[in-house]
Structures are given as C-alpha cells and as structure tokens.
Amino acid sequence: MKQKGIIIELTSLLDVILIMLFWVMMNSSEQSENYREKADEEIAAAKEQTKLVQMQLDEEKQKEEALAKALTGFADGQLYELKISFDENSDVLVLSFGGEELDRLGFEQTEAIKQAVNSIEIPEDAAVLAAVIYDGNKVLYRDMQSIRAALDELSKENDNIYIGYIDTSIKN
C-alpha cells in the first residue's frame, strides 16, 4: 500500500495571519494619527511663540525708533532739564525743555516732582531724554537722594524716560 502524505489544511492558518496583518496595519495607522496630532499641536505652539517673539521684536523696534528720534532732538537742543538752582529764599528745582521753563518745584515735593514730569505731554511712543543738573558742592546729599529716588521711581514706571545726572562741581 502506498502512503499518502499528510494533508494539512492551511485555510484557518491563513485567516489568522490575515487577521493579525490587518490588526498591525490598523494599529500603525492609529499611531501615525496620534503622532500627526502631536506634531500639529507642536506646530501651533511654535507659531504662537513666533507671534509673541515677533510682537516683542516690533515693540523693541518702536522703542529704538523713539530713542533715535529723541537723540536727534537732543542734538537740536530738545532736552528736558531739571536744574537745581538757588533763589534768595530757598532751593528750587526748575523743570525746563529746550531752554523754556515749564515748572518750579521745592525740594521736599517728591510727589510734585513726579506730577510735574508726568504732566508734560509726551507722545506715547516717544522717548524722553532728561538731565538733572546740580552743583554737588551746594546741594545737600539728602536732597539729591530724594530727587533721585523720585526720578528713579518715575523712570521705572515709564520705560521711555532716560535720566542722566550732571554734577557741575566736578571739573575735568
């Protein structure tokens, strides 16, 4: 008698293999969707951050233009001056712009100094260059400190105010 070989039915095995192949394909497409969503979120976050950086850059450009304009004005004599002068009665702060007197204040009027400087009508995006001119031999240290404190506070509140201090008692 002849022996016939063993007959193996592969139909069910092929079904299992095809089912596993479909499952792997579906799983990989689902993962690629998740990666795509994460990538889209990161792109959106990067675009938002780019907008913020661009806004900051534009703001800094405006400040730079305002400062350049103020420096041009400074060359033409447009400088705010806070001179400490001495009248016959008391020491006085004289606020002036381009040689024209705007206000006279007393030393003890810290709030008045801030109000006087704030009352100057300055365009919103303009930079202001100011010089405090004083004689270090005549002005008391405490008076100068109170003036400096008031102006420094004002300078912190307004990014576009730049203050320099000139002591006329110092000779080169």
Image: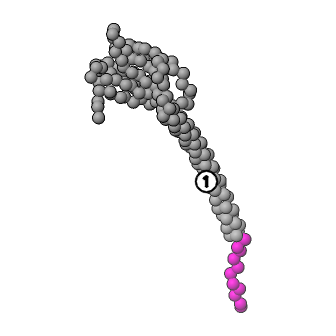
The foreground one among 169 and 119 is: 169
Residue 21 x, y percent position in the rendering: 67, 65
Type of residue at label 1?
Tyr
Q: Quadrant of the N terminus?
A: bottom right
| Residue located 48% across and 32% down the image | 74
Q: Which residue, given by chain and number where applicable, does mark 1 sit on?
A: 35
Q: Quadrant of residue 153?
A: top left
Residue 8 x, y percent position in the rendering: 69, 77
Q: Main secondary structure of the magenta part?
A: loop
Left or right position of 20 against 125? right
- Outermost residue, bottom side: 1
Chain part drawn in magenta: 1-11
Q: Quadrant of residue 92?
A: top left
When the figure is inspected, residue 68 is found, relative to residue 167, above or below; the finding is below
**Judging from the image, what secondary structure is the residue with disc 1 in?**
helix
The answer, for residue 56, to whether it is visible in the render is: no
| Residue located 32% across and 21% down the image | 144
Please tell me how crowded label 1 is: few (under 14), some (14-19), or many (20+) other residues with Cα within 10 Å: few
The foreground one among 157 and 4 is: 157
The answer, for residue 121, to whether it is visible in the render is: yes
Residue 160: in magenta span: no
